[in-house]
Amino acid sequence: MAFDWTAADGPSRLAELLAGADVVIEASRPRALEQLGIEAWAAPARVWLSITGYGRDQPQRVGFGDDAAVAGGLVARDESGPVFAADAAADPATGLLAAVAVLDRLAAGGRWLLDVALARTAALLAAEPAPAEPWRGEIAAPRARAV
């Protein structure tokens, strides 16, 4: 679906669509939808998944897969020190982690806001040893709050 945000009914059409969703996936900085009057906390969805570069607690920080991966520590090392590694690894890994988190929260019941950040996922990938259940781990666990 396409929405014209400049049209008077654009935001209301999106709000109407969101009202019937069980799961909402937001892949923009939270303020983008908040400027349209749409807030995750107020949405009736069972699970609102917010995927950002650095997390909802840093709403102005723009992040992309590669820079967020480096920020999370996903780098290789050579004799000169840290070097870039794992091109575009944070994006698909974050998507997989987010999917597991959504399924986990749907099974738990209630309403949830999941905060899954590319940099935290990269930190998980860079961790040694890797946690057995990363969606419950302390390094990169998606932040979930009941709403």
Image: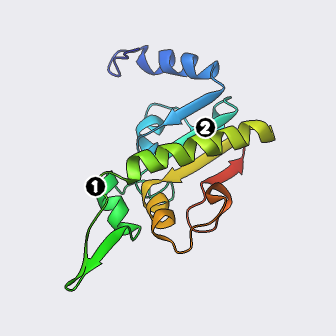
Can you identify the residue that label 2 sits on?
Answer: 48
Residue 42 on image: x %, y %: 65, 35
| Left or right of 106 in this view: 89 | left
| Quadrant of the frame with the C terminus | top right
- Which badge, 1 or 2, is on the more N-terminal residue? 2
Kindly check if marks 1 and 2 are in contact, taking CB atoms under 8 A apart as contact: no
Q: Give the quarter of the image for residue 24.
A: top right
Residue 144 in the image: x percent, y percent? 66, 51
Does the rendering let one see residue 145?
yes
Front-most of residues 10 and 134: 134
The amino acid pointed to by label 1 is Asp
Quadrant in the rendering for residue 70: bottom left
- As drawn, is 131 to the left or to the right of 127? right
Residue at coordinates 61% horizontally, 47% vertically from top-left?
A: 114
Q: Residue at x 57, y 23 (%)?
A: 18
**What is the secondary structure assignment of the residue under circle 1?**
loop
Image coords of residue 15 (percent x, y)? 54, 22
Q: Which residue is mark 1?
A: 87
Q: Nearer the viewer, residue 60 or 49?
A: 49
Task: Residue at 45% x, 22% y: name it.
Answer: 11
Name above or below for residue 62 compared with residue 5. Answer: below
The crowd level at tag 2 (other Cα within 10 Å; few <14, some 14-19, many 20+) is: many
Residue 73 lies left or right of residue 101; in this view the side is left
